């Protein structure tokens, strides 16, 4: 039996009136050793509940593989910590999550099949979802409120009304949760307009709305759709996310707090999106594609009440004051900012060129025509495509269908240009010094689209390549997932082009810090083998967050994959983040 039930105008928890005051905090965007700290800070702000998505693509990276539930993905441990902190949990298992996350959380082994109708009653899709739920739910059932755990409600799909209207699909998901032992309250969430609420709703399942302003209008829309039952904003947007090349989005704390007060004054429940955004570590960021492809940056700070590094920001204190007007807030001091590592310079003295060592870094696959990343079985990262150019002289390289998402082109090791999906580029003029010259094309997956019809768009080279209309055939393909940089050969070669740079630095007491890379261009960063994510001087983001648990007392290792070039052999660890020039959200 569900611990959380509804009345004509609110919730009951174990039979007593209850208002959900929740904040979004995704376990997979936070270092596991920091989960307890972030949950404590959620309680101290006055939250009684936290919300999290579940990223299918990370938990089940292979179609026939086991479920990953360790490290960053140890969801049962996260739920146990929330329970220990006295917090309830809203669980949002998708299967689609959006979340500015790679592919919206749908695994690439599924989205790469163009025949499958995603997010529909297509039995090939629902069959894959069923197999995932068969693996996911058994270890989570002990954490449901009906078993004495913290999970009080479970979401069915995610803003489905913005995508489709297949009610049979939603019913399949809801019935599947029930059949696998989920007794908790089920809910849907959709943007606060009549069309989306109608298309994404399901009879017998609580409808909730998502919005960030115009609170009265949004609640009126929800009431019109669902005249009886609690009013709830399942995503109260109090900040926003950033794309590369855009300003850093912020929202005035007083403005957001005033809207939160309006929401709570109306008697509604709320889930603040985000309470703590965290980080798109590694290759996990998503992308949008409206008129052009726009990848999301590494930071998911979101201008949230709790910053990317877990420090209370202006919204934390403003929201705490608002919540205190409507619900009990712990009689404890607000948390202080955490300690930071003293400023530290890191000299990167060891250099290993990528093109020269690619044979030792990746398995070789041969193909007459260049395959996509999906066809090579690569979920994320890079592919180096290599072939020979038949003639010398000036000419045009044409990449039929373009590239997914960014390609650096080299002739005999010399850089000759860059093609970007976001600019719809397919052609590059080159000068070939000799017949038989080596053509290298290094293609970077910048993140899978997470919203709309382009989820699953292919990566890599997207069609045949020609030089002055002559087809180029016979390609050596090297997939580069870069999931283990410890095995990269060490060298000190000075040749131009993409290269791994290594350096070491000493730490007395580990603490949070921020990696700054002035003079560097674009690439990836690892500390002690932990993949911090992507950097790019395009901005807005100019530092990468380094969680304290990544560091160790004594000697630490920094590895950078610099794709272009650098004016320095030095990196810096700083005490403050630089997320770029700001723009009001």
Image (cartoon, rainbow, N blue to C red):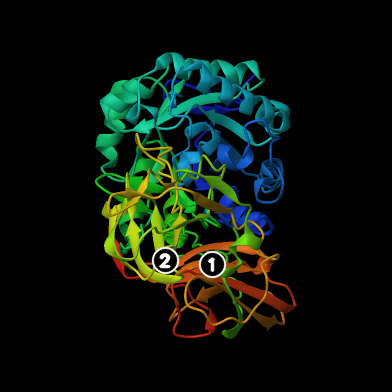
Query: How many numbered markers are drawn?
Result: 2
Residue 122 spot, x, y in % from top left: 47, 17
Q: Which mark is residue 410?
A: 2
In the rendered image, the vertical position of residue 442 relative to residue 401, given as above or below: below
Characterize the local packing of mark 2: few (<14), some (14-19) or many (20 or more) Cα atoms within 10 angstroms.
many
Q: Could you give the CA–CA distance between mark 1 and mark 2, rounded to whole angstroms?
A: 10 Å
Q: Is mark 2 on a helix, strand or loop?
A: strand
Q: Is mark 1 on a helix, strand or loop?
A: helix
Residue 471 spot, x, y in % from top left: 36, 47
Left or right of 101 on screen, residue 181: right
Which residue is label 1 attached to? 355
Name the one closer to the observer, 551 or 364. Answer: 364
The answer to which quarter of the image holds residue 347 is: bottom right
Characterize the local packing of mark 1: few (<14), some (14-19) or many (20 or more) Cα atoms within 10 angstroms.
some
Q: Quadrant of the N terminus?
A: top right
Name the one closer to the observer, 102 or 366. Answer: 366
Q: Which residue is pictured at 54% across the width and 67% down the height?
A: 355
Decide if residue 77 is in sight here.
yes
Residue 231 spot, x, y in % from top left: 39, 30
């Amino acid at each position: 039996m569900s611990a959380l039930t509804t009345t004509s105008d609110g919730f009951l928890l174990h039979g007593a009136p209850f208002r959900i005051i929740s904040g979004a905090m995704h376990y997979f965007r936070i270092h596991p050793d920091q989960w307890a700290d972030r949950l404590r800070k959620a309680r101290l702000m006055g939250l009684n509940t936290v919300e999290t998505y579940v990223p299918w693509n990370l938990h089940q990276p292979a179609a026939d593989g086991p479920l990953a539930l360790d490290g960053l993905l140890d969801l049962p441990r996260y739920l146990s910590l929330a329970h220990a902190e006295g917090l309830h949990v809203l669980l949002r298992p998708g299967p689609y999550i959006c979340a500015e996350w790679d592919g919206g959380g749908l695994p690439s082994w599924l989205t790469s099949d163009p025949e499958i109708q995603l997010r529909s009653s297509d039995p090939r899709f629902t069959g894959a979802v069923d197999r995932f739920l068969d693996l996911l739910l058994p270890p989570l059932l002990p954490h449901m409120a009906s078993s004495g755990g913290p999970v009080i409600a479970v979401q069915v799909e995610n803003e489905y009304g913005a995508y489709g209207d297949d009610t049979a699909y939603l019913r399949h998901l809801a019935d599947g949760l029930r059949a696998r032992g989920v007794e908790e309250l089920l809910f849907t969430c959709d943007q606060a307009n009549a069309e989306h609420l109608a298309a994404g709703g399901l009879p017998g399942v609580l409808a909730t709305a998502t919005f960030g302003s115009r609170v009265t209008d949004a609640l009126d829309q929800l009431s019109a759709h669902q005249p009886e039952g609690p009013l709830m904003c399942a995503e109260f947007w109090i900040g926003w996310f950033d794309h590369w090349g855009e300003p850093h989005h912020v929202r005035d704390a007083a403005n957001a707090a005033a809207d939160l007060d309006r929401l709570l004054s109306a008697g509604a429940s709320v889930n603040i999106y985000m309470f703590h955004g965290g980080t798109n570590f590694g290759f996990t960021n998503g992308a949008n594609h409206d008129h052009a492809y726009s990848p999301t940056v590494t930071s998911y700070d979101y201008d949230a009440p709790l910053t990317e590094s877990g420090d209370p920001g202006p919204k934390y204190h403003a929201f705490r004051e608002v919540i205190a007007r409507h619900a009990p807030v712990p009689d404890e001091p607000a948390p202080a900012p955490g300690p930071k590592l003293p400023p530290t310079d890191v000299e990167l003295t060891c250099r290993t060129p990528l093109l020269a060592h690619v044979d030792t870094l990746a398995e070789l696959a041969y193909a007459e025509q260049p395959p996509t990343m999906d066809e090579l079985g690569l979920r994320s990262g890079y592919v180096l495509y290599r072939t020979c150019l038949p003639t010398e002289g000036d000419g045009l390289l044409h990449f039929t269908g373009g590239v997914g998402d960014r390609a650096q082109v080299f002739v005999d090791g010399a850089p000759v240009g860059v093609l970007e999906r976001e600019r719809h580029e397919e052609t590059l003029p080159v000068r070939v010094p000799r017949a038989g010259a080596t053509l290298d094309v290094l293609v970077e997956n910048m993140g899978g689209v997470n919203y709309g019809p382009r989820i699953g768009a292919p990566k890599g080279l997207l069609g045949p390549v020609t030089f002055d209309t002559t087809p180029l055939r016979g390609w050596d393909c090297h997939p580069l997932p870069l999931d283990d940089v410890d095995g990269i050969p060490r060298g000190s070669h000075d040749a131009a082009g993409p290269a791994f740079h290594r350096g070491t630095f000493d730490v007395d007491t580990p603490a949070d810090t921020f990696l700054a890379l002035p003079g560097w261009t674009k690439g990836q960063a690892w500390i002690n083998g932990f993949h911090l994510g992507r950097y790019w001087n395009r901005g807005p983001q100019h530092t990468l967050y380094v969680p304290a648990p990544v560091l160790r007392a004594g000697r630490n290792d920094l590895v950078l994959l610099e794709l272009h070039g650098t004016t320095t052999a030095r990196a810096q660890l700083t005490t403050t983040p630089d997320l770029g020039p700001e723009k009001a959200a």
